Image (spheres, rainbow, N blue to C red):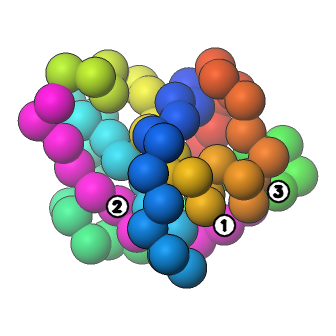
């Protein structure tokens, strides 16, 4: 599944986290705390899944905390998978 990148301007330390909404989590069949590989072009990182009920993260978006955003050299709207 391809997700659009969305920056979450929060630093969480040395953790790599991807946040999805409940609908996207159900579609991907992931639970909070699961590990997934997130790719942006040739860059990839294993990330911990967080699930939000907040409507800021829309269907088919991947919310990336600052460390993950930087590590994957993401930009708004980049297609992650």
Give the side of residue 3 with respect to residue 77, left or right.
left
Residue wearing tag 2? 49
Secondary-structure class at tag 2? strand
Q: CA distance from mark 1 to mark 3?
A: 7 Å
Q: Position of residue 17 (x, y in %)?
A: 45, 62
Picture residue at 57% right of the left edge, 52% below the top: 66
Quarter of the figure with residue 67: bottom right
Q: Position of residue 4 (x, y in %)?
A: 56, 26
Residue stretch in magenta: 44-54
Can you tell which mark lies on residue 14? none
Majority SS type along the magenta span:
strand
For label 1, the crowd category at 10 Å Cα-Cα, with few meaning under 14, some 14 to 19 and many 20 or more, is some
Residue 50 is covered by the magenta coloring: yes
Marks 1/3 in contact by CB < 8 Å: the verdict is yes
Asked whether 47 or 6 is in front, the reply is: 6
Secondary-structure class at tag 1? strand
Give the side of residue 65 with respect to residue 55, left or right.
right
Picture residue at 18% right of the left edge, 42% below the top: 52
Furthest residue to the left? 53
Residue 57 visible here: yes
Residue wearing tag 3? 43
For label 2, the crowd category at 10 Å Cα-Cα, with few meaning under 14, some 14 to 19 and many 20 or more, is many
| Relative to 67, residue 64 above or below | above
Quarter of the figure with residue 54: top left
Can you tell which mark lies on residue 45? 1
């Amino acid at each position: 599944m391809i997700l659009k990148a969305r920056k979450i301007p929060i630093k969480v330390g040395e953790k790599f986290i991807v946040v999805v909404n409940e609908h996207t989590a159900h579609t991907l069949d992931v639970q909070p705390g699961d590990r997934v590989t997130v790719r942006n072009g040739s860059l990839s990182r294993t990330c911990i899944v967080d699930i939000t009920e907040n409507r800021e993260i829309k269907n088919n978006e991947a919310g990336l905390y600052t460390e993950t955003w930087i590590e994957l050299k993401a930009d708004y709207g980049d297609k992650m998978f």
